Image: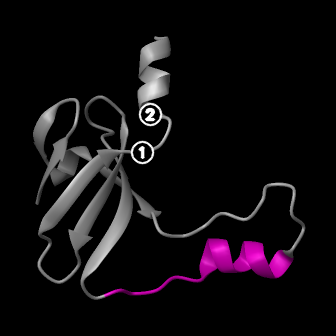
Amino acid sequence: MIITCPHCGPRDLAEFSYFGDATATRPDPSSTDQDAWNAYVYDRENPAGEHREYWQHSGGCRGFVIVTRNTLTHEISDIRLASGTQARRKRK
């Protein structure tokens, strides 16, 4: 599978690390609701079709991207920087 990093261009999957489901909503950090945290950390769907995922270009620029990928065909329909990544790069 080839993932096109917004900074580095098309790269082999081996340069990336999977960081999980990009559709899961993290509970408020100050929340003590154990059921909500348990669901966020452990409960996962196994979607068939398009799904948004976090990936890091760990073998390149180390940027985080959100990849929209069809889990049945591995076809990628969208790649964008994860929130905050551009701001961190501008500070350097």
Name above or below for residue 39 compared with residue 79: below
Q: Which mark is residue 85?
A: 2
Magenta stretch bounds: 34-47
The overriding secondary structure of the stretch rendered in magenta is helix
The residue positioned 45% from the left and 63% from the top of the image is 22
Magenta span includes 41: yes
Magenta span includes 85: no
Name above or below for residue 55 compared with residue 38: above
The residue positioned 43% from the left and 16% from the top of the image is 90
The residue positioned 90% from the left and 67% from the top of the image is 32
The residue positioned 76% from the left and 77% from the top of the image is 36
Label 2 amino acid? Thr
In this rendering, would 88 be left or right of 56? right
Q: Which mark is residue 36?
A: none
Q: Using the rendered view, name the quadrant where residue 77 is placed.
A: bottom left
Dot 2 and dot 1 residues touching (CB under 8 Å): yes
Give the percent coordinates (x, y) of residue 5: 21, 40
Q: Which mark is residue 82?
A: 1
Give the percent coordinates (x, y) of residue 6: 22, 36
Front residue of 82/14: it is 82
For mark 1, give the secondary structure.
loop
Give the percent coordinates (x, y) of residue 13: 18, 53
Front residue of 7/42: it is 7
